[in-house]
Amino acid sequence: MEHLHGLLRIHVHRGVNLAKRDVLSSDPYVIVRMGKQLFKFDHPVFALISLDENQRGLKLKTRVVNKNVNPEWNEDLTLSVDDTNLPVKIFVYDRDTFSLDDKMGDAEFQIGPFVEALRMELNGLPSGTIITRVQPNRENCLAEESCIIWTEGKVVQNLVLRLRNVESGEVELQLQWIDIPGSRGL
């Protein structure tokens, strides 16, 4: 645990205008990864599953939303963070019953600006205060400006990611940090 900084909770809100991979629609789901290790925390008393690059691991995955190119997942997926410089990668797939699932695009983002905001002394700020803004550019997958906000005593970041390697689609997320006892913190 002492090698971990903490946990990153990713609220996967929804997909917008996702690609059709079946005849009339798609059955999308999202997978989230950070680095080569995949972790899953289902309960406050959790088990850490560490994998080397040759092992297949537990994937952080949303449920499948059937026949919908504008799905609402509203699910929280939680990653352990031991290196704040690694990108978070998002993969969207179409569930298929009798063949391999189809790729529906991918995106990635850095948590650096979010971590910088977490390190600031922000107590006493009014809820809804924008701490910083991250602009879309060629090096990120942001579809629009992303705001890091102080809300209800927490730092959160709202992101709209444009999917790559596909004809259309965006995924809306919100980030939140969770400190864990015994970790090295930020």
Image (cartoon, helix red, strand yellow):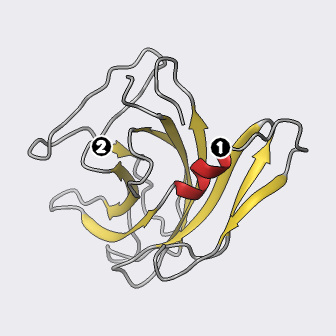
Residue wearing tag 1: 118
55 left or right, relative to 133: left
Residue 28 in sight: no
Q: How crowded is mark 1: few (under 14 residues within 10 Å), some or many (20 or more)?
A: some
Instruction: Locate the C terminus by quadrant.
Output: top right
Q: In which quarter of the image is the N terminus?
A: top left
Look at the image and tell me whether residue 169 can be seen.
yes
Inspect the image, locate mark 1, and give the three-letter code of the amino acid beneath it: Leu
Residue depicted at 38% across the width and 68% down the height = 26
Q: Which of 98 and 142 is in front in this view?
A: 142
Is residue 162 positioned above or below 130 on the image? below
- Residue 147 is situated, as x and y percent measured from the top left of the image, at 71, 62
* Measured Cα–Cα span from mark 2 to mark 1: 26 Å
Identify residue for label 2: 59
User: Left of 173 or right of it: where is 151?
Assistant: right
Residue 22: image location, x then y, percent: 32, 73
Q: Residue at x 52, y 18 (%)?
A: 181
Residue 111 placement (x, y as % from top left): 51, 54
